[in-house]
Amino acid sequence: MIDKGYVIGVIAAMGLVTFALRALPFVAAHWLESHPLVQRLGRFLPLAIMTLLLLHSALGAAREDPRGPWPEVVAVALVLVLQGWRGNALLSILTGTGVYVLMRNY
């Protein structure tokens, strides 16, 4: 049987590491906001990540659909047009998602 003190120590250590990892961005915020590498990553990384997620999900869904990639192509094009025209991310995302769901299901 496992010693109770050992189990409590392991749980306490895991809790301490978890708390430290969650607190680190707040403690290092001053350094992070002024560091040039972090500023440069902050300019292009969110767009790069969103582009990769979009490509991965759209290509994966297009491969599974026997009708081809048309729902994905139309939804992405609609989102791009709406975002360029209105500049409202919520409107673009909701409309693109709605059109995609309708095209995939009907």
Image: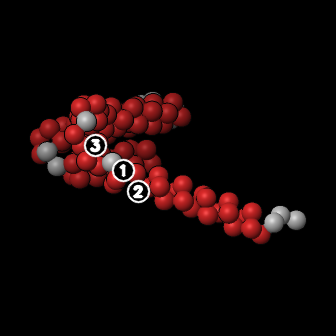
- Cα separation, mark 1 vs mark 2, equals 6 Å
Q: Nearer the viewer, residue 45 or 21?
A: 21
- Cα separation, mark 3 vs mark 2, equals 14 Å
Q: Does residue 29 show up?
A: yes
Residue depicted at x 23% and y 32%: 36
Report whether 92 appears left or right of 54. left
Q: Which mark is residue 31?
A: 3
The residue that disc 1 covers is: 25
Q: Does residue 44 show up?
A: no
Q: Are marks 3 and 1 in contact (CB under 8 Å)?
A: no
Report whether 34 appears left or right of 46. left
Instruction: List x then y, in percent, for residue 89.
Output: 21, 48
Instruction: List x then y, in percent, for residue 33.
Output: 24, 43
Circle 3 Cα neighbour tier, 10 Å, few/some/many (<14 / 14–19 / ≥20)? few
Residue depicted at x 25% and y 47%: 30
Q: Which mark is residue 23?
A: 2
Give the quadrant of residue 37: top left
User: What amino acid type is highlighted by mark number 3?
Assistant: Trp
Nearest to the eye among marks 3 and 1: give it.
Answer: 3
